[in-house]
C-alpha cells in the first residue's frame, strides 16, 4: 500500500525548488522526549518508580522520525481521511489512539460516528470534546481515557493541562448522557507508568484492563454501554 504522507514538500527541497512558505519538520530531542514521555522530571533523572526501561531510552529515541503532522499544512488530514477510508473498508471498529493521535480519533468519530464503536485514548489530547460535541457524537460512543503516573506538575505537554482536559471531556460526555471513564492508573494502585505505557514493564496488565473495558461495552442493554474498569 501507499503511505498517507505527501512527500512533495520534502522532494522540492531536494530538487532545489523549495516552497519558501513551507514550515520546518519537527524532530524531538532526547531532552524533550525524556520529559514529554515522563521518564523523569528532567533529562537523565528518572522518576523513582518509573516503569519504563530506562536503559532502552536511547533505542526508543532512535525510532523517532520527523513529525509532519503538526507543521506541514493539512498533514493531519491525511491521517484522518486515511483511517476513515480503512474503517469504510473493514467496517466499524474500536479505535485506540495515543498522545497526539487523541485529537485524530475524536475528529474521526465526529465525522463518521457510524464507524467508531468506542474510543480508547491513551493520554491523548481530548480538549476538543466540548459539551456540544459530547451531546452530538459521544453520547453514543463509549470513551475511555487512560493515564499513567507522575503527571501532576509534570513539565512538557503531557502534564496537568492535557490530563485535566481529559477529565473535562469525560465529564462532558457523562453529563450528555454518554458513557465515559477516566482510568487514572495510580487511583487503582498502579504506579510508575510513563506516557509511553505500551513500553512499560506492566504493559500487558494495562492492555488487559483496556480489553476488559472494551468487552464490557457490549454488555449494556443497548449493546454500547461502557462500565468502569
Image (cartoon, rainbow, N blue to C red):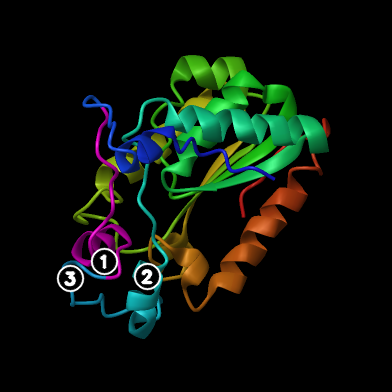
Few, some or many C-alpha atoms within 10 Å of disc 1 (few <14, some 14-19, many ≥20)? Answer: many
How many callouts does the rendering have?
A: 3
Few, some or many C-alpha atoms within 10 Å of disc 2 (few <14, some 14-19, many ≥20)? Answer: few
Q: Position of residue 72 (x, y in %)?
A: 35, 32
The answer to whether any part of residue 69 appears in the image is no
The answer to whether any part of residue 173 appears in the image is yes
Q: Which residue is mark 1?
A: 34
- Disc 1 and disc 2: Cα gap in Å? 13 Å
Label 1 vs 2, first from the N-terminus: 1
Residue 62: numbered disc: 2
Quarter of the view holding residue 37? bottom left
Residue closest to the eye, 117 or 100: 100
Q: Main secondary structure of the magenta part?
A: loop
Indicate which label's residue lies in the foreground, 1 or 2: 2
Q: Position of residue 181 (x, y in %)?
A: 55, 43
Label 3 vs 1, first from the N-terminus: 1
Secondary structure under tag 3 reads loop
The answer to whether the residues at label 3 and label 1 have Cβ atoms under 8 Å apart is yes
Label 2 vs 3, first from the N-terminus: 3
Q: In what quadrant of the picture does the N terminus appear?
A: top right
Residue 152: numbered disc: none
Q: Residue at x 53, y 22 (%)?
A: 134
Quarter of the view holding residue 118? top right
Apparent side of residue 43 relative to residue 123 in the rendered image (left or right) = left
Residue closest to the eye, 226 or 49: 49
Q: Which residue is mark 3?
A: 43
Which region shows up in magenta? 22-39
Apparent side of residue 57 relative to residue 228 in the rendered image (left or right) = left
Q: Residue at x 36, y 63 (%)?
A: 149
Q: Is residue 36 magenta?
A: yes
Indicate which label's residue lies in the foreground, 2 or 3: 2
Amino acid at each position: 500500500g501507499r503511505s498517507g504522507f505527501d512527500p512533495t514538500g520534502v522532494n522540492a527541497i531536494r530538487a532545489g525548488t523549495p516552497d519558501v512558505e513551507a514550515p520546518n519538520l519537527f524532530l524531538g530531542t532526547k531532552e524533550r522526549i525524556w520529559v514529554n514521555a515522563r521518564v523523569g522530571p528532567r533529562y537523565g533523572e528518572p522518576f523513582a518508580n518509573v516503569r519504563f526501561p530506562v536503559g532502552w531510552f536511547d533505542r526508543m529515541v532512535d525510532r523517532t522520525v520527523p513529525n509532519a503532522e503538526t507543521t506541514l499544512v493539512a498533514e493531519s488530514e491525511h491521517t484522518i481521511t486515511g483511517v476513515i477510508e480503512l474503517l469504510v473498508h473493514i467496517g466499524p471498529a474500536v479505535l485506540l489512539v495515543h498522545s497526539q493521535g487523541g485529537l485524530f480519533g475524536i475528529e474521526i468519530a465526529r465525522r463518521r460516528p457510524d464507524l467508531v464503536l468506542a474510543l480508547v485514548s491513551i493520554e491523548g489530547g481530548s480538549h476538543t470534546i466540548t459539551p456540544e460535541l459530547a451531546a452530538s457524537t459521544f453520547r453514543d460512543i463509549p470513551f475511555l481515557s487512560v493515564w499513567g503516573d507522575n503527571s501532576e506538575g509534570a513539565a512538557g505537554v503531557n502534564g496537568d493541562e492535557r490530563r485535566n482536559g481529559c477529565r473535562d471531556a469525560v465529564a462532558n460526555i457523562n453529563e450528555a448522557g454518554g458513557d465515559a471513564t477516566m482510568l487514572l492508573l495510580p487511583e487503582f494502585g498502579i504506579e510508575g507508568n510513563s506516557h509511553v505505557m505500551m513500553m512499560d514493564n506492566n504493559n500487558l496488565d494495562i492492555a488487559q484492563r483496556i480489553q476488559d473495558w472494551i468487552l464490557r461495552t457490549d454488555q449494556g442493554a443497548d449493546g454500547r454501554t461502557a462500565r468502569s474498569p
